[in-house]
Amino acid sequence: MTQNIYDTPEFFDGYSRMARSVHGLDAAPEWPALQAMLPDVRGSRVVDLGCGFGWFCRWAQTQGAAEVVGMDVSQNMLDRARATTPSPQVAYVHADLERLHLPWGRFELAYSSLALHYVEHLADVFAMIHRTLVPGGRFVFSAEHPIYTAPAQPGFVQDATGQRVWPLNQYSLEGPRTTDWLAKGVIKRHRTLATYLNLLIQAGFTIRQVEEWAPSAEQLAAQPALAEEQDRPMMVLVSASR
């Protein structure tokens, strides 16, 4: 079962204060790049895996999706999503992605934002997503980049001048990583970029686009704090088709 850290008070309080939690997709710097990967959703049936506060679900509904289903393991997240979603075309379901059961050939688009790095048995999840998509259906997701999830201990390598240049990591050693982010003991599942892509291929997907996200010049001008994201990609964005 996926660790449900989002239902712990300390973590949920901290997450609720983040800019992307308060202002939604417009406050997520990777959203323009991720949005560009999406197909036209008008008339489509859409499932959002790890829907959180429901920002993408509401966006898809306003873009003309015929049906939107948001799934999340966190009851706190779902309660907030339901409270801020008036549309009857959007439904929210309490579900653990590790135990996911979706009907065959049900959706035209499966979407997931920053949730898959919590999933241990990713091959099973990819296989289920492939089965629930119609032929030609799309799967678009973001995840924390493996370079970002790799560090197994705090600290940084130093160059000859003593400058901090790169975090200590064990990139090729896949498995759980326990970090202190918003709360102590948050478990994320590190896997290499090759593993992400090969698992998609093994599930039967055709990879359409991969982007190792970094801020644009315009974003850096508007948000100078994003400059640190140029040192290593924070997220990987992927579009695949069935």
Image (tube, helix red, strand yellow):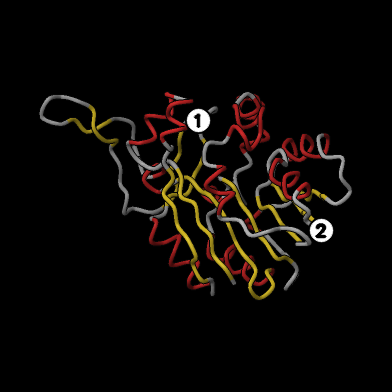
Q: Amino acid at mark 1?
A: Trp
Write the residue at 60% across / 61% down: 139
Q: Measure the C-alpha gap from mark 2 to mark 1.
A: 37 Å
Q: Is residue 49 above or below residue 226?
A: below
Q: Given contact means CB atoms under 8 Å apart, are the residues at marks 2 and 1 in contact? A: no
- Mark 2, residue position: 66
Secondary structure beneath disc 1?
loop
Secondary structure beneath disc 2?
loop
Q: Residue furthest front?
A: 218
Q: Which mark is residue 181?
A: 1
Which of these two is toward me, 117 or 185? 117
Which of these two is toward me, 219 or 192? 219
Write the residue at 78% across / 53% down: 64
Q: Quadrant of the C terminus?
A: bottom right
Q: Amino acid at mark 2?
A: Ala
Q: Is residue 33 above or below residue 227?
A: below
Name the side, left or right, on which 144 lies relative to 94: left
Q: Residue furthest left?
A: 160
Q: Is residue 151 above or below residue 200?
A: above
Residue 76, picture quadrant: top right
- Residue 195 lies, in percent from the top left, at 41, 61
Which of these two is toward me, 91 or 221? 221
- Residue 16 lies, in percent from the top left, at 65, 27
Which of these two is toward me, 38 or 9? 38
